[in-house]
Image: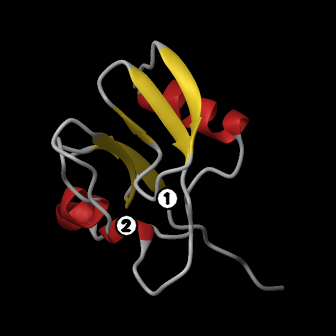
Amino acid sequence: MVEIIQDPTVWIKSAAGASCETTCQARGGCKEDAWPATLEEFQEILDESGLKCVSIQQGGAKYDPSTDGRYCGWHGDPGEGSRSRCAVSGDAGTYRFCPCFGDEEL
């Protein structure tokens, strides 16, 4: 029997304009395979992390899931190209929700 061990994920709200690579650097890195695939998964992330949104929109930017401090976009655009979603930064008014390795916030 093979035991599969899942690496735990902790969701952290980035600083304004920061990438998830930067946000997760002290926590062992950003988990590129942990992005939410459904609105329900994003809602679970919000519930578990205590992060809040006044309203949730589809989004579609490569830096989603993110918030401007009130409104959230959840569905990122994986798009084409070699640049990972973890490496993308939003503008100065955008805070990303980042999937970091670890089981608790530092």
Q: Quadrant of the N terminus?
A: bottom right
Identify the element where label 1 is drawn.
loop
Looking at the picture, which amino acid does disc 1 mark? Pro
Q: How many marks?
A: 2
| Above or below, 4 relative to 40 | below
Residue on which the image places disc 1: 8
Query: Where in the figure is residue 87, as x and y percent of width and height?
Result: 31, 70
Which-is-in-front pick, marks 2 and 1? 2
Q: Do the residues labelled 2 and 1 touch (CB within 8 Å)?
A: no
Measure how far apart labels 2 and 1 are at the Cα level: 17 Å
Q: Name the residue under label 2.
A: 86
Q: From what the image shows, is residue 85 above or below residue 50?
A: below
Identify the image quadrant of residue 30.
bottom left
Indicate the position of residue 63 as horizontal and vertical percent values: 40, 54
Residue at 27% from the left image edge and 39% from the top image edge? 94
Q: Residue 10, position in %: x, y?
A: 41, 49
Using a 10 Å C-alpha cutoff, classify the residue at mark 1 as few (fewer than 14 neighbours), some (14 to 19) or many (20 or more). few
Amino acid type of disc 2?
A: Cys
